[in-house]
Image (cartoon, rainbow, N blue to C red):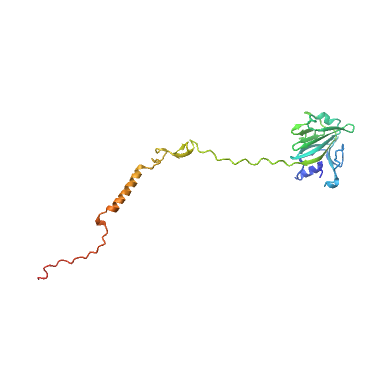
């Protein structure tokens, strides 16, 4: 489907995908239906295939009473379109552009005094025109392509009618960016000043180990444990073995059965 200028503006204002990312018009700026200045309307354009049924261009009027027209147009990222600017001011574009050849812009004489400029713009490029320099925020003539101003440093205002049209709009999806990088590796191990109290840094293992000789609040213990505690444990084991095998007979259990002898009553039978 062939795009035209008003169609792009309508889609932008509805929040739909559009070749434009910005559009302003002020004063005597009016849409003209089906008007072809300089043969710009593409011959392939078929109104029956376009939902707007007509090809529209924007006219910036030069008004004696009231404010004349002004507009600013900015291309959306990923989009490219050919723009046609038609001026009824004699040699307006010839006198007010620079680097036109490098920008691949074509300037043509139209009729006797009119002149047109045709240029292809892409995402981020923009132009502004204010016929009588009456509207705040819209410069009298500025044309920027690839970040470079095609207009001269101090251009004139158009001071006459301007007609603007668009064709051959196309969208190119941006290439995907690089994927995420590799996951970060483990952080560095502890350093000499990173160990907790009671521990020191061992360069051979790159770790913190208990401090030797009871330093750092280690309670007087080294890697081998307390020698006093070892002697105590050994003494307890020895005492237990001695007590088990050498306790006196008086504390041993005797399983024999004893019968108590009757008392001696000698001499009672001689009575």
Examine the rendered structure and indicate whether residue 156 appears above or below residue 197: above
Q: Residue furthest right?
A: 112
Quadrant in the rendering for residue 120: top right
Residue 196 visible in the picture: no
Q: Residue at x 26, y 56 (%)?
A: 251
Relative to 221, 50 lies left or right:
right
Task: Identify whether 52 is placed above or below 159.
Answer: below
Residue 87 appears left or right of 149: right
Q: Nearer the viewer, residue 108 or 153?
A: 108
Residue 216 picture quarter: top left
Question: Residue at left 84%, top 42%?
Answer: 56
Residue 41 position, x and y percent, is 85, 40
Quadrant housing the C terminus: bottom left
In this rendering, does residue 80 appear at all? yes
Is 102 drawn above or below residue 250 in the view shown? Answer: above
Please report the residue visible at 33 percent of the width from the left and 49 percent of the height from the top.
Answer: 237
| Residue 26, horizontal then vertical, whole percent | 80, 38
Q: Nearer the viewer, residue 15 or 189?
A: 189
Q: x and y percent of residue 46 in the render?
A: 85, 45
Of the 4 image quadrants, the one containing the N terminus is: top right
State left or right for residue 147 relative to residue 194.
right
Where residue 97 appears, as percent x and y from the top left, is 80, 30
Tell me where residue 135 sits by quadrant: top right
């Amino acid at each position: 489907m062939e795009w035209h200028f008003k169609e792009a503006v309508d889609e932008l204002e509805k929040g739909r995908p559009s070749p434009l990312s910005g559009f302003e018009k002020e004063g005597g700026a009016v849409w003209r239906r089906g008007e072809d200045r300089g043969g710009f309307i593409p011959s392939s354009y078929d109104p029956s295939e376009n939902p707007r049924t007509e090809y529209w261009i924007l006219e910036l009027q030069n008004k004696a009473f009231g404010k004349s027209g002004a507009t600013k147009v900015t291309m959306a990222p990923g989009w490219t379109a050919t723009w046609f600017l038609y001026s009824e001011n004699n040699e307006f574009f010839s006198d007010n552009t620079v680097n036109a050849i490098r920008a691949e812009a074509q300037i043509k004489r139209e009729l006797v005094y009119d002149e047109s400029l045709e240029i292809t713009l892409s995402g981020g490029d923009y132009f502004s025109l204010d016929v009588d320099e009456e509207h705040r925020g819209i410069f009298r003539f500025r044309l920027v392509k690839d970040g470079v101003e095609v207009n001269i440093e101090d251009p004139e205002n158009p001071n006459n009618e301007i007609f603007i049209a668009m064709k051959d709009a196309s969208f190119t999806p941006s290439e995907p960016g690089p994927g995420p990088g590799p996951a970060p590796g483990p952080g560095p191990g502890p350093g000499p000043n990173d160990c907790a109290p009671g521990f020191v840094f061992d360069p051979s293992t790159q770790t913190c180990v208990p401090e030797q000789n009871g330093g750092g609040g280690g309670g007087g213990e080294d890697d081998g444990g307390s020698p006093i505690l070892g002697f105590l444990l050994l003494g307890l084991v020895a005492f237990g073995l001695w007590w088990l095998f050498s306790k006196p007979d008086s504390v041993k259990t005797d399983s024999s059965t004893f019968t108590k002898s009757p008392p001696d009553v000698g001499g009672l039978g001689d009575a």
